[in-house]
Image (cartoon, rainbow, N blue to C red):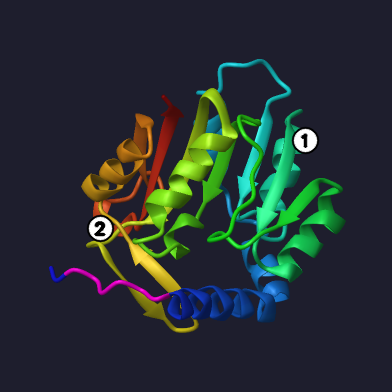
Amino acid sequence: MKPTPKLAPDQLTRITTTTLDHYDSVAEQFREGTRDHDVSQNIDALLRHIEVPAPARILDFGCGPGRDLRTFMQLGHTAVGLDGAARFAEMARQDTGCEVWQQDFLTLDLPAQHFDGIFANAVLFHIPRQELPRVLRELHATLKPRGVLFSSIPRGDNQEGWRGPRYCVYHDLESWRALLTEAGFVELEHFYRPAGLPREQQPWLASVWRAA
Protein backbone atom coordinates (compact mmCIF):
# COMPACT_ATOMS: atom_id res chain seq x y z
CA MET A 1 0.00 0.00 0.00
CA LYS A 2 1.40 3.38 -1.01
CA PRO A 3 1.70 5.95 1.78
CA THR A 4 -0.93 8.67 1.72
CA PRO A 5 0.57 12.03 0.69
CA LYS A 6 0.78 14.55 3.52
CA LEU A 7 -2.26 16.80 3.65
CA ALA A 8 -1.60 20.54 3.62
CA PRO A 9 -3.40 22.92 6.01
CA ASP A 10 -5.78 24.10 3.28
CA GLN A 11 -6.66 20.49 2.46
CA LEU A 12 -7.41 19.77 6.12
CA THR A 13 -9.63 22.85 6.24
CA ARG A 14 -11.50 21.66 3.16
CA ILE A 15 -11.92 18.18 4.64
CA THR A 16 -13.42 19.59 7.83
CA THR A 17 -15.62 22.20 6.17
CA THR A 18 -17.01 19.93 3.47
CA THR A 19 -17.73 17.04 5.83
CA LEU A 20 -19.44 19.27 8.40
CA ASP A 21 -21.41 21.12 5.72
CA HIS A 22 -22.73 17.76 4.57
CA TYR A 23 -23.90 16.78 8.06
CA ASP A 24 -25.50 20.19 8.58
CA SER A 25 -27.39 19.81 5.29
CA VAL A 26 -28.80 16.37 6.18
CA ALA A 27 -29.23 16.87 9.93
CA GLU A 28 -32.98 16.23 10.03
CA GLN A 29 -32.78 13.14 7.82
CA PHE A 30 -29.83 11.85 9.83
CA ARG A 31 -31.73 12.24 13.11
CA GLU A 32 -34.75 10.36 11.79
CA GLY A 33 -32.65 7.68 10.10
CA THR A 34 -30.58 6.90 13.20
CA ARG A 35 -33.16 7.51 15.94
CA ASP A 36 -33.89 3.80 16.43
CA HIS A 37 -30.36 2.42 15.94
CA ASP A 38 -29.56 0.01 18.76
CA VAL A 39 -26.09 0.80 20.10
CA SER A 40 -26.73 -0.63 23.57
CA GLN A 41 -23.90 -3.14 23.05
CA ASN A 42 -21.50 -0.23 22.58
CA ILE A 43 -22.81 1.75 25.52
CA ASP A 44 -22.61 -1.31 27.77
CA ALA A 45 -19.02 -1.92 26.62
CA LEU A 46 -17.99 1.55 27.77
CA LEU A 47 -19.87 1.56 31.06
CA ARG A 48 -18.78 -1.88 32.30
CA HIS A 49 -15.13 -0.80 32.21
CA ILE A 50 -15.59 2.53 34.02
CA GLU A 51 -14.39 1.96 37.56
CA VAL A 52 -16.09 4.85 39.35
CA PRO A 53 -19.67 4.54 40.60
CA ALA A 54 -22.45 6.40 38.84
CA PRO A 55 -22.79 9.16 38.01
CA ALA A 56 -19.75 8.92 35.76
CA ARG A 57 -18.74 11.97 33.73
CA ILE A 58 -18.95 10.98 30.06
CA LEU A 59 -17.99 12.84 26.88
CA ASP A 60 -20.11 11.81 23.89
CA PHE A 61 -17.54 12.67 21.21
CA GLY A 62 -19.36 13.23 17.93
CA CYS A 63 -22.72 13.21 19.68
CA GLY A 64 -24.74 14.04 16.56
CA PRO A 65 -28.37 14.94 17.34
CA GLY A 66 -28.06 13.62 20.89
CA ARG A 67 -29.59 10.14 20.87
CA ASP A 68 -26.87 8.58 23.03
CA LEU A 69 -26.50 11.64 25.24
CA ARG A 70 -30.10 11.09 26.28
CA THR A 71 -29.39 7.41 27.03
CA PHE A 72 -26.40 8.21 29.24
CA MET A 73 -28.48 10.76 31.10
CA GLN A 74 -31.33 8.29 31.59
CA LEU A 75 -28.82 5.77 32.97
CA GLY A 76 -27.88 8.26 35.67
CA HIS A 77 -24.62 9.64 34.30
CA THR A 78 -23.42 13.19 33.66
CA ALA A 79 -22.98 13.48 29.90
CA VAL A 80 -21.47 16.26 27.82
CA GLY A 81 -21.79 16.24 24.06
CA LEU A 82 -19.31 17.45 21.46
CA ASP A 83 -19.89 17.80 17.74
CA GLY A 84 -18.48 19.87 14.92
CA ALA A 85 -21.76 20.28 13.06
CA ALA A 86 -23.70 23.33 14.25
CA ARG A 87 -27.11 21.77 13.54
CA PHE A 88 -26.24 18.61 15.45
CA ALA A 89 -25.01 20.58 18.46
CA GLU A 90 -28.20 22.64 18.45
CA MET A 91 -30.40 19.56 18.16
CA ALA A 92 -28.57 17.77 20.94
CA ARG A 93 -28.94 20.71 23.31
CA GLN A 94 -32.65 21.08 22.58
CA ASP A 95 -33.45 17.37 22.75
CA THR A 96 -31.48 16.47 25.88
CA GLY A 97 -30.86 19.60 27.92
CA CYS A 98 -27.24 18.46 28.23
CA GLU A 99 -24.22 20.68 27.83
CA VAL A 100 -22.99 20.36 24.23
CA TRP A 101 -19.76 21.83 22.85
CA GLN A 102 -19.45 22.69 19.19
CA GLN A 103 -15.81 22.00 18.31
CA ASP A 104 -13.96 21.03 15.16
CA PHE A 105 -12.26 17.68 15.81
CA LEU A 106 -8.96 19.03 14.44
CA THR A 107 -8.92 22.05 16.78
CA LEU A 108 -10.16 20.63 20.06
CA ASP A 109 -10.12 22.55 23.34
CA LEU A 110 -10.73 19.98 26.07
CA PRO A 111 -10.24 20.22 29.85
CA ALA A 112 -7.47 18.11 31.34
CA GLN A 113 -8.34 14.92 33.27
CA HIS A 114 -12.03 15.75 33.28
CA PHE A 115 -13.94 12.69 32.05
CA ASP A 116 -14.32 9.14 33.33
CA GLY A 117 -15.28 7.88 29.87
CA ILE A 118 -15.42 8.93 26.22
CA PHE A 119 -17.98 7.47 23.83
CA ALA A 120 -16.71 7.90 20.25
CA ASN A 121 -19.31 5.99 18.27
CA ALA A 122 -18.93 6.09 14.46
CA VAL A 123 -16.93 9.32 14.45
CA LEU A 124 -13.13 8.90 14.63
CA PHE A 125 -13.04 7.59 11.05
CA HIS A 126 -13.59 11.15 9.82
CA ILE A 127 -10.20 12.27 11.17
CA PRO A 128 -7.37 12.09 8.60
CA ARG A 129 -4.74 9.50 9.47
CA GLN A 130 -1.94 12.05 9.80
CA GLU A 131 -3.92 14.01 12.43
CA LEU A 132 -5.27 11.04 14.37
CA PRO A 133 -2.27 10.46 16.69
CA ARG A 134 -2.54 14.05 17.95
CA VAL A 135 -6.33 13.85 18.40
CA LEU A 136 -6.04 10.56 20.28
CA ARG A 137 -3.46 12.09 22.63
CA GLU A 138 -5.87 14.97 23.27
CA LEU A 139 -8.65 12.50 24.10
CA HIS A 140 -6.26 10.65 26.40
CA ALA A 141 -5.40 13.92 28.15
CA THR A 142 -9.04 14.80 28.85
CA LEU A 143 -9.65 11.44 30.54
CA LYS A 144 -9.05 11.01 34.24
CA PRO A 145 -6.41 8.43 35.20
CA ARG A 146 -7.71 4.97 34.22
CA GLY A 147 -10.51 6.57 32.24
CA VAL A 148 -12.05 4.61 29.38
CA LEU A 149 -12.42 5.31 25.66
CA PHE A 150 -14.92 3.45 23.50
CA SER A 151 -14.60 3.71 19.72
CA SER A 152 -16.52 2.24 16.82
CA ILE A 153 -15.11 2.64 13.32
CA PRO A 154 -15.83 1.08 9.91
CA ARG A 155 -13.13 -1.54 9.39
CA GLY A 156 -11.10 -1.59 6.20
CA ASP A 157 -7.65 -1.80 4.63
CA ASN A 158 -6.13 1.41 5.99
CA GLN A 159 -7.32 3.51 3.11
CA GLU A 160 -8.62 7.06 3.28
CA GLY A 161 -10.21 9.63 1.04
CA TRP A 162 -13.49 11.13 -0.06
CA ARG A 163 -16.65 9.09 0.02
CA GLY A 164 -19.11 11.44 -1.54
CA PRO A 165 -19.12 14.68 0.49
CA ARG A 166 -17.48 13.06 3.53
CA TYR A 167 -13.82 12.32 4.22
CA CYS A 168 -13.43 8.81 5.62
CA VAL A 169 -10.57 6.67 6.92
CA TYR A 170 -10.76 2.88 7.22
CA HIS A 171 -8.52 0.98 9.65
CA ASP A 172 -7.90 -2.68 10.30
CA LEU A 173 -7.51 -3.99 13.85
CA GLU A 174 -3.70 -4.07 13.74
CA SER A 175 -3.30 -0.45 12.62
CA TRP A 176 -5.99 0.72 15.05
CA ARG A 177 -4.22 -1.04 17.92
CA ALA A 178 -0.94 0.59 16.98
CA LEU A 179 -2.48 4.07 16.92
CA LEU A 180 -4.24 3.71 20.28
CA THR A 181 -1.22 2.12 21.95
CA GLU A 182 1.03 4.91 20.70
CA ALA A 183 -1.39 7.43 22.22
CA GLY A 184 -1.08 5.81 25.66
CA PHE A 185 -4.10 3.49 25.74
CA VAL A 186 -4.29 -0.16 26.80
CA GLU A 187 -6.79 -2.41 25.03
CA LEU A 188 -9.57 -3.87 27.17
CA GLU A 189 -11.63 -5.60 24.48
CA HIS A 190 -12.75 -5.46 20.87
CA PHE A 191 -15.63 -6.92 18.89
CA TYR A 192 -17.29 -6.61 15.50
CA ARG A 193 -20.79 -5.37 14.76
CA PRO A 194 -23.61 -6.05 14.14
CA ALA A 195 -23.48 -8.92 16.62
CA GLY A 196 -24.40 -12.44 15.57
CA LEU A 197 -23.54 -12.14 11.87
CA PRO A 198 -20.73 -13.65 9.80
CA ARG A 199 -17.57 -11.51 9.82
CA GLU A 200 -18.06 -10.40 6.21
CA GLN A 201 -21.38 -8.90 7.30
CA GLN A 202 -19.86 -7.04 10.28
CA PRO A 203 -18.49 -3.76 8.89
CA TRP A 204 -17.91 -2.10 12.28
CA LEU A 205 -14.89 -2.59 14.56
CA ALA A 206 -15.66 -1.66 18.18
CA SER A 207 -12.95 -1.43 20.81
CA VAL A 208 -12.53 -0.30 24.41
CA TRP A 209 -9.35 1.23 25.85
CA ARG A 210 -8.06 2.39 29.22
CA ALA A 211 -5.92 5.49 29.63
CA ALA A 212 -2.66 4.10 30.98
Tell me which numbered mark, 1 or 2, is placed earlier along the sequence. 1
Q: Nearer the viewer, residue 190 or 183?
A: 183
Q: Secondary structure at mark 1?
A: helix
Q: Are marks 1 and 2 in contact (CB under 8 Å)?
A: no
> Circle 2 is placed at which residue position?
200
Q: Where does the image place residue 18, in percent across and percent down from the top left? A: 55, 81
Mark 1 and mark 2: span between their CA atoms? 34 Å
* Residue type, numbered disc 1: Gln
Name the mark on residue 157. Answer: none
Q: Is residue 29 above or below residue 55?
A: below
* Quadrant position of the N terminus in the picture: bottom left
* Residue at 75% in and 70% down: 87
* Quadrant position of the C terminus in the picture: top left
Q: Where does the image place residue 163, in percent across and percent down from the top left? A: 40, 79
Q: Is residue 71 above or below residue 61?
A: above
Q: Secondary structure at mark 2?
A: helix
Q: Where does the image place residue 51, in percent across and percent down from the top left? A: 56, 17
> Circle 1 is placed at which residue position?
74
- Extreme front residue here? 9
* Residue at 69% in and 66% down: 31
Q: Is residue 141 above or below residue 107?
A: above
* Residue type, numbered disc 2: Glu
Left or right: 37, with 89 as reference point: left
Q: Nearer the viewer, residue 46 or 15?
A: 15
Residue range corresponding to the magenta coloring? 3-8
Left or right: 137, with 58 as reference point: left
Q: Where does the image place residue 58, in percent across and percent down from the top left? A: 66, 35
Please tell me whether residue 95 belongs to the stretch shown in magenta. Answer: no
